[in-house]
Amino acid sequence: MADKPASATRTPLNRDRVLRTAVQFADEHGLTALSMRKLAQVLGVEAMSLYNHVRNKDDLLDGIVDLVVAEIEAPAIGGDWKSALRKRATSAHEMLRRHPWATGLIGSRINVGPAMLHYIDATVGCLLAAGFTYQQADRAWNALDSHIYGFTLQEQNFPLEPAEYASAAAQFLPLIPAEEYPHMNALAERVIAGTHNGVADFDFGLELILDGLERLRSV
């Protein structure tokens, strides 16, 4: 029996396949490398075929943002609100680590999809159920997200790996003499000696915010 033509065996193109392929491409090559032409090449189709599934590049970007946001564990409404928001923050941070390009893109999109709407709605609902007002809940989730995105951006752009901190501190120690910068010098000495690793802690900042929200809720 003759083989079927390639067109008959090719996986049908649809919006979900286009978006998931775009996410994978951005993960491997970065967001700036993503174009409709390159995406079409990966999918083995003509670029114009993509426009049957995404309206334009903006629609593609909105779509991949919503796809990765769906990976975040939305908080449960009711129960232990701090535990739920802690899981939410950790889940979001892990997602942004898997998709480094998403950290900057999420905050720049105006059009939000169903996954983002559910994510925000569940977060506000969790805070309201815990006794926060709408105004407090709005400020609270924005403070949490500022920590998540800000910490992740700093982590992704920091020029050193954690294992390099001690040697880098030793290299820069002569540039921060104790007589001029006593506190920075002492901190660098601790990193060199191994009594402090110099690694910023995501959970440290998160717990400060959650504890602060607890005090706000109790007022």
Image: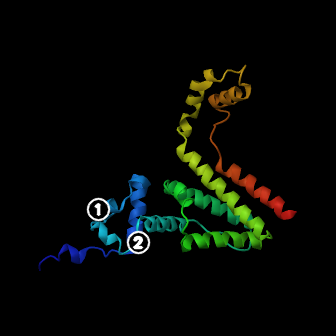
- The extreme left residue here reads 1
Q: CA distance from mark 1 to mark 2?
A: 18 Å
Residue located at (22% from left, 78% from top): 8
Figure quadrant of the C terminus: bottom right
- Residue 55 tag number: 2
Q: Position of residue 11 (x, y in %)?
A: 30, 74
Q: Where is residue 26, by image quadrant?
A: bottom left
Residue located at (75% from left, 58% from top): 210
- Residue 3 tag number: none
| Residue bearing mark 1 | 41
User: Looking at the image, which is closer to me, 178 or 197?
Assistant: 178
Q: Where is residue 44, by image quadrant?
A: bottom left
- Mark 1 Cα within 10 Å, few/some/many (few <14, many 20+)? few
Q: Amino acid at mark 2?
A: Arg
Residue located at (78% from left, 56% from top): 211
- The extreme bottom residue here reads 1
